[in-house]
């Protein structure tokens, strides 16, 4: 053991054989038990000292196997709260690790060997992860476990931040044996909690319907949330939370689990026969099989484990700050994001330079700050059947090249943004004609098209280099300020021509590692470009991508009412500075719903704001509203993007939705409140705010009324009743 740290966040009690990770907010405690197995004891609100009272209760439980070579019937891994479990060792719950050895055995017994405690946080090679600005911000405990027979070693890494209720966890496996092994499963995190009534929150959805808050009881058996689509997916986000039945937005315990990864994932929640709960989070083990030769290692992605005793808003507050301050990077991490207009819902692919210019000119008139040219500017792309992979300008649409158009945008004092979909290939493309082998395809089998496109094997260096070089040639020849990085299908035909038969199970993860490599290169080489992630809307909204791209298109659904739920759910785990939201045309193109420009503006202004409609078609009155929205957003933008976001009323629970933003110094609060359907006899409900200074007075700048911060939070106020559906109100309160 090597203990190098003086100011301890991590203690090891030699006598009790107990680790205690702590800061002022949280404690995480686990022990080394008989036989060298690690047992979880506690995670939650800080306790000053642990006095050893949680020794695992023992009992002779039928059909729970005991340790090999012992006679003790009361000790079984089957009901020990384990810190990290494996398979074939008598623990019949879902395992964290499954290792196939040269002789075909999948059994391992991982026991404690050593540990180190050090300042700082090690980097995870090739993977995004939370970082530190200086080594004193956190300390890391690394516990080494070994399976004696196979000589496979696991390093369990725990980094505790000094000032945040956050523990970052990951696992590194090293094959110290002489024969090759296969990792069939290696969770980034296991958390076993004692028997209790708990609920789990997940963020399921679909394309155009992402990240709805789903809350359910944890019942006996295993419930898993996952993606096997090669990417995070719209269908199930890689964030879950575990809470008490009475936890609400402001009170109660909640644990958050954010996987910093953008590929197949699985979050398992198991209630065992005795009521204890096991959580496993990591790369999805289905279709995963990673070969580790002697002396080689495998590193899992990281999970950010968070705890709040202030309900869901408390959890979100921690996550928003953490993702903004210690996961997002680069020049735009804290930059005010430009208000943009995107031509997608305005023109789709039916445009050329002449048709776009009036849109640009109008954007300038209305005070916007960036013009984004979406899909259809490259190859010979007039529809979605061609040209992915050919990142050269479409001469028919831009006869003098893209630079002339970019210059036009810039002379209008707007930034210029451009859409790419770098991970894809069309059969009708030069890239395919030259490199038909670049795509994922099972030999001899016809690959499945989706949106008429196929997936590049981005895990291969040659493929990455080709795409990298094409993109950088374009970026070097044309002044581009922003890139929208899209991905419009999921992965099928999982077979990489670069891998031998026995390594095909690595294809999915290698794809993600390849993507990270490409993104790391491009974002480093072009630090002045703002990157926005996108995958058919919010299909790859995760903490891993946020490390490279500080914002993401939240959903292809731009309907203001649908967006309320999508943004409400997304905000549980992701900061507002990462959520792009645009005003689009009404009736909405995805739902056919009619909403006012005011409500559309209010919802979009609650994120990274922009427009996505033909500005030239707006009436004079609408242009006046847009100008007002744009100038209002410029005023409130710092608070929206970097203030404290608080959810007040959940749109899925009633006819009302509300949220607010508070400046970090509590001097200003911006509140958005939405009434969904009109009612002839509405309830007189009061809106109560949160996060204000109770000792100070605030003025509603529209009405001039003065309220105590305590009044706004406790008595609340009645809102005016407006006729019609889908109304919105905004309140701006400032300290008197
Ligand atoms: C899906 C994106 O989410 C849209 O905003 C748009 O960029 C299209 N792709 C373009 O193909």
Image: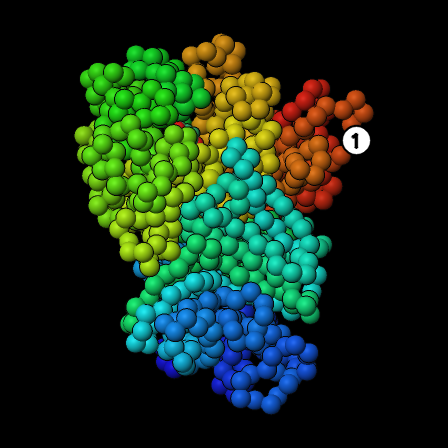
**Rendered view: 414 above or below 21:** above
Give the labeled residue for mark 1. Answer: 683
Q: Look at the image and tell me whether residue 336 can be seen.
A: no
In the rendering, at what x and y percent does residue 434 appear?
A: 20, 34
**SS under mark 1:** loop
Left or right, 736 with respect to 112, comes to right
> Depth check: 371 or 642 in front?
371
> Alpha-carbon neighbours of circle 1 within 10 Å: few (<14), some, or many (≥20)?
few
Residue 576 image offset from top left, x and y in percent: 49, 40
Furthest residue toward right: 681
Identity of the residue drawn at 47% across and 38% down: 538
Residue 145 lies in quadrant: bottom left
Horizontal placement of 224 versus 418: left or right? right
- The quadrant of the rendering that contains the C terminus is top right
Q: Is residue 90 visible?
A: yes
Image height check: is 483 above or below 49? above
For image coordinates 48% across by 43% down, the residue present is 233
In the image, farthest residue toward the front: 444
- Where residue 559 sits: x, y (%)? 55, 26
Residue 293 located left or right of residue 553: left
Picture quadrant of residue 369: top left
Tell me the quarter of the image containing the N terminus: bottom left
- Above or below for 666 versus 488: below
Residue positioned 68% across, 58% down in the render: 219
Query: How many tags in the picture?
Result: 1
Residue 563 rendering spot, x and y as whole percentages: 56, 32
Q: Is mark 1 within 8 Å of ligand 1?
A: no
Quarter location, residue 186: bottom left
Q: Name the residue rendered at 44%, 42% in the picture.
A: 540
């Amino acid at each position: 053991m090597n203990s190098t740290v003086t100011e301890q966040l991590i203690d090891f009690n030699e006598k009790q054989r107990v680790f205690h990770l702590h800061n002022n907010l949280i404690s995480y405690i686990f022990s080394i038990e008989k036989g060298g197995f690690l047992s979880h004891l506690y995670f939650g609100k800080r306790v000053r000292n642990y006095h050893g009272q949680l020794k695992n209760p023992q009992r002779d439980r039928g059909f729970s196997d005991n340790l090999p070579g012992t006679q003790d019937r009361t000790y079984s891994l089957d009901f020990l709260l384990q810190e990290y479990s494996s398979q074939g060792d008598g623990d019949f719950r879902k395992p964290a690790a499954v290792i196939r050895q040269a002789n075909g055995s999948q059994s391992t017994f991982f026991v404690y060997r050593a540990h180190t405690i050090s300042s700082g946080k090690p980097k995870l090679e090739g993977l995004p992860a939370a970082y530190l600005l200086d080594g004193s911000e956190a300390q890391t405990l690394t516990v080494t476990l070994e399976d004696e027979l196979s000589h496979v070693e696991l390093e369990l890494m725990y980094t505790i931040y000094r000032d945040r209720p956050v523990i970052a966890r990951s696992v590194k496996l090293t094959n110290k044996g002489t024969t090759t092994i296969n990792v069939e499963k290696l969770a980034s995190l296991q958390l076993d909690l004692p028997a209790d009534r708990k609920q789990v929150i997940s963020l399921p959805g679909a394309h155009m319907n992402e990240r709805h808050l789903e809350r359910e009881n944890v019942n006996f058996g295993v419930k898993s949330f996952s993606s096997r689509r090669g990417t995070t997916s719209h269908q199930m986000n890689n964030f879950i939370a575990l809470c008490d039945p009475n936890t609400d937005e402001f009170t109660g315990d909640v644990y958050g689990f954010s996987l910093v990864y953008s590929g197949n994932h699985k979050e398992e929640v198991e209630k065992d026969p005795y009521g204890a709960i096991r959580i496993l989070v990591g790369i999805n083990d289905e279709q995963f099989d990673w070969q580790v030769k002697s002396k080689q290692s495998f590193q899992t992605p990281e999970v950010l484990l968070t705890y709040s005793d202030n309900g869901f808003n408390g959890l979100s507050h921690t996550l928003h700050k953490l993702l903004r301050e210690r996961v997002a990077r680069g020049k735009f991490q804290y930059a005010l994001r430009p208000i943009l207009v995107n031509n997608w819902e305005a023109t789709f692919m039916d445009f050329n330079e002449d048709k776009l210019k009036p849109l640009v000119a109008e954007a300038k008139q209305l005070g916007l700050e960036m013009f984004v040219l979406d899909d259809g500017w490259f190859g010979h792309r007039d529809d979605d059947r061609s040209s992915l992979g050919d990142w050269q300008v479409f001469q028919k649409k831009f006869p003098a090249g893209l630079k002339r158009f970019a210059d036009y945008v810039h002379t209008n004092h707007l930034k210029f943004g451009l859409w790419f979909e770098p991970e894809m290939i069309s059969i009708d493309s030069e890239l395919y004609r030259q490199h038909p082998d670049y795509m994922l395809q099972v030999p001899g089998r016809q690959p499945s098209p989706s949106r008429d496109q196929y997936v590049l094997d981005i895990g291969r260096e040659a493929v990455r280099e080709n795409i990298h070089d094409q993109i950088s040639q374009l970026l070097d020849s044309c002044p581009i300020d922003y890139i929208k990085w899209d991905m419009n299908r999921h992965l099928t035909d999982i077979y990489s021509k670069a891998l031998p038969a026995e390594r095909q199970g690595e294809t999915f993860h290698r794809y993600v590692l390849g993507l990270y490599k490409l993104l790391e290169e491009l974002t480093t080489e072009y630090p002045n470009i703002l990157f926005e992630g996108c995958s058919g809307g919010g299909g790859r909204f995760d903490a891993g991508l946020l490390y490279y791209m500080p914002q993401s298109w939240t959903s292809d659904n731009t309907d203001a009412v649908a967006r309320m739920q999508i943004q409400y759910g997304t905000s549980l785990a992701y900061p507002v500075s990462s959520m792009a939201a645009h005003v689009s045309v009404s009736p909405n193109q995805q739902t056919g719903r009619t909403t006012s420009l005011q409500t559309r503006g209010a919802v979009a202004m609650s994120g990274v704001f922009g427009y996505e409609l033909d500005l030239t078609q707006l009436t004079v009155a609408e242009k006046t509203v847009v100008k007002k929205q744009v100038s209002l957003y410029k005023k409130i933008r710092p608070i929206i993007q970097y203030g404290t976001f608080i959810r007040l009323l959940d749109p899925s629970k009633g006819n009302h939705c509300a949220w607010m933003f508070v400046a970090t110094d509590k001097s200003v609060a911006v509140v958005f409140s939405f009434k969904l359907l009109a009612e002839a006899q509405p309830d007189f409900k009061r809106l109560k705010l949160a996060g204000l200074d109770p000792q100070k007075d605030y003025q509603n700048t529209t009405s001039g009324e003065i309220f105590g911060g305590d009044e706004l939070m406790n008595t609340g106020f009645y809102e005016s009743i407006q006729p019609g559906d889908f109304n919105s109100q905004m309140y701006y309160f400032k300290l008197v």
